[in-house]
Image: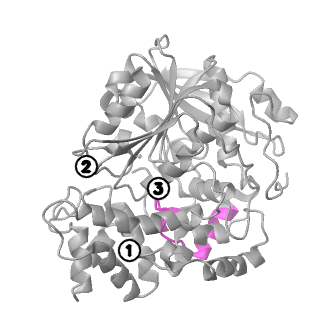
Amino acid sequence: MRSRLLVTAVGAAAVAALGGPAAAGSTPPPSADAAHPAGAAASAVAARPRLTDPHPCKDQPGFTCSTLQVPLDHRGRVPGTLDLQVATADNATAPKGVLLFLTGGPGQPGVPFATRIAKQRLPELANDYRFVLLDQRGTGEFGAINCPQLQAQVGSSDIAAPTPAAIKECSDVLGDRRGLYSTEQTVADYEALRRALGVDKMVVDGVSYGSFTAARYAAVHPSHVGKVVLDSVLPHVDPQADDGLYFVGLHAQARVLRDACATAPACPSDPAEDLAWVVRHRPAADGVKIFDAIVSYEFLDPTYRDPNPPGLPAGHGDLVGALRAARQGDPARLDAIITDMAPGGDPVASYSSGLHIDTFCSDSVFPWGRSDAPLATRQTALDRFLRHTDPRSVWPYTRATSAGSGFTQECLRWRSRPAAEPPARLPNVPVLLVNGDHDLSTPLEWAYEEATHAPNGRVVVVKGASHSIQNRERGHAGRDAVIAFLGG
């Protein structure tokens, strides 16, 4: 989920800017509060994790960068280690302790965002908490997985589908390391970091895919979290096995576009009906392109109606108007938005699409099962599942859009060691779930779904805001909710 980074509604003016394969369905391992990695190489690293080579972080004043060495495979099946870059704020004696801030993707590093988050976006918390960020395994300046074709074709997009050749190239790049970049491994890295920091508990705050890793860390290590913030929420478990098919995201576009039209002046037509008509009157492949373009567009214009949003050429905005014009026979404006939002080409140090595919496909459950399912049976299982899917669950799109999207097409062809499923229940600690109601990357519906797993959780809805509240919200209502939650 890209991060281009009790129910309470807030902020009417806040509009803006994750040896052999384990068996599918295997029993989750015990909490790492009690478990330790098996294998001599893994145990040697895990026994006493340390932060080494401390030095001022480049371009991140107030932060010290260090190296955390972790096992390549925390289960001990594959030997080797990885060096992860960690940024720690210099206020080591902060009165409220460590706040581990987790960025998105999967594919995005954390260290480059240290001062932006702590000093610019959440300065009210920077004195009380010691902010800590890290480059997730497989990301960042010193460890990003580089799959050139995948990087060029899809970059940071979840939705654009790469060619089979690009997927094979990336599979070959990773080789026997496929499945070792799952969230299960990343969560074990976070635990090693906690031990290296010498703290018993942390506040864990994650945005987008970071919300997924934050929740999974809390579920696996419940005794080591004090509070949890989940921002732009991706549910950490998927019992219905459809998150990768993007059913919720496809269907949510109708709600969001209609809500955009609830603001004066009134729209001349129903934007959801316009979108449904356009998807059904263009080539089937265009459904994926339109879906991808609209999700990308939210980062520039969460109102969906601004004719001149920053970051686009003059006159290239107003998505709602472009859909209406396309239905009336003039697709030029919609085609311009699709071109403007075209995926691919992100620098690998800023976003690793290779990390993204291995993490997501190793984590996820699909109609064909997990990432160790036989490749030859997957398409048949997908086709059967979609035939029995109510078309209304993906409207205003079609089942073909779901089948053709990047998550589905990538994971159809990706074989790896599947990650173990974490406990579904989050610990009984305070959990804040904050989500924009105009978010299309991680729709509000997902926040409510995740809240069912949080016995002490509270959902805050940021009206008019799109993805990544703490990093991109134009107003301050969502951040105020976070500050109040963590400041108490």
The percent position of residue 318, horizontal first and vertical second, equals 21, 67
Residue 355 drawn above or below residue 410:
above
Q: Of 218 and 160, which appears nearest the observer?
A: 218
- Crowdedness of circle 3 by 10 Å Cα count: few (<14), some, many (20+)? some
Q: Secondary structure at mark 3?
A: helix
Compared across the picture, whether 151 is left or right of 177 comes to: left
The quadrant in which the C terminus is found is top left
Q: Of 290 and 71, which appears nearest the observer?
A: 290
Magenta range: 151-172
The percent position of residue 448, horizontal first and vertical second, equals 49, 49
Q: Is residue 421 magenta?
A: no
Measured Cα–Cα span from mark 2 to mark 1: 22 Å
Residue at 14 percent of width and 61 percent of height: 264
* Mark found first going from the N terminus, 2 or 1: 2
Q: Secondary structure at mark 2?
A: loop
Quarter location, residue 377: bottom right
Measured Cα–Cα span from mark 3 to mark 1: 21 Å
Residue 15's disc is 2
The percent position of residue 67, horizontal first and vertical second, equals 59, 28
The percent position of residue 387, horizontal first and vertical second, equals 62, 83
From the image, state whether disc 3 or disc 2 is nearer to you. 3
Inspect the image, locate mark 3, and give the three-letter code of the amino acid beneath it. Glu
Q: Secondary structure at mark 1?
A: helix
Residue 290's disc is 1
Residue 445's disc is 3
